[in-house]
Image (tube, rainbow, N blue to C red):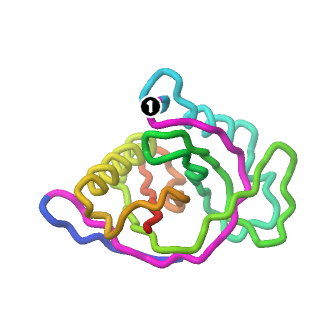
Amino acid sequence: MIVVSLTTIGEMAMPKQVHQRQFSIIGIEARTTNAKEMSNQAVIGKQWQRFFQEQVLQKIPDKADPNIYAVYTDYATDRSGEYSFVIGAKVNQESRVPPGMVLKTVPAGNYAVITSDKGPVDKVVVAAWQQIWALEDKAALGGRRAYRADFEIYQRAADPQNSQVDIYVGLK
């Protein structure tokens, strides 16, 4: 577990950079775009609902830790293009993939880490991504986005109304 703190410049917290080792997750996958997510065609909320209704976490073997991971990967282009969204768990290398699930590898590399505010999970995660896009537009992430894989760790999210999430944004 990497613990990071943020430095605030003005009103915006500046992300810390970490080097993350490669790891794998198993979970359920859907394709979407940010445009879809901002419309009535949103997919991510439905994936979360499915994740909990079908008790996906309990069906994943060989978990490396107890946290829930959400991974954004297989980007077609950049934040305006299509990408895969996978919700699941970090697993040990030789894990068996249950039917209906996928195995995705998060590549090793440098990541900017943004920690959300505390509050309702659906609101704080969206606000954190808006902050990431603002930092990206100002070239303040600490590097250019790689658009290979980004991920969220839900380790302080047991209470959906008072959650805090770490978002790792892959850098070039």
- Secondary structure of the residue carrying numbered label 1: helix
Of all residues, the one furthest to the left in this rendering is 10
Residue 101 placement, left or right of 113:
right
Of all residues, the one furthest to the top in this rendering is 40
Quadrant location, the N terminus:
bottom right
Q: In the figure, residue 61 lies in which quadrant?
A: bottom right
Residue at the location (47% across, 64% down)? Answer: 170
Residue at the location (86% across, 51% down)? Answer: 98
Secondary structure mostly taken by the magenta-highlighted segment of the chain: strand
Q: Position of residue 47 (x, y in %)?
A: 63, 37
Q: Is residue 151 visible?
A: no
Is 63 in the magenta?
no
Q: Position of residue 24 (x, y in %)?
A: 69, 65
Q: In the figure, residue 67 lies in which quadrant?
A: bottom right
Q: Is residue 113 above or below residue 137?
A: below
Q: Is residue 75 above or below residue 82?
A: below
Question: Is 56 in front, or is 35?
Answer: 35
- Name the amino acid type tagged 1: Ala
Question: Is 131 in front, or is 107?
Answer: 107
Quadrant location, the C terminus:
bottom left
Q: Position of residue 95 (x, y in %)?
A: 83, 66
Residue at the location (27% across, 52% down)? Answer: 137
Q: Position of residue 13 (x, y in %)?
A: 24, 62
Magenta-colored span: 11-35
Question: Is 1 in front, or is 34?
Answer: 34
Q: Is residue 86 visible?
A: yes
Q: Is residue 37 above or below residue 61?
A: above
In this figure, which residue is indicated by the disc labeled 1?
35
Residue 84 placement, left or right of 98:
left
Residue at the location (16% across, 66% down)? Answer: 9
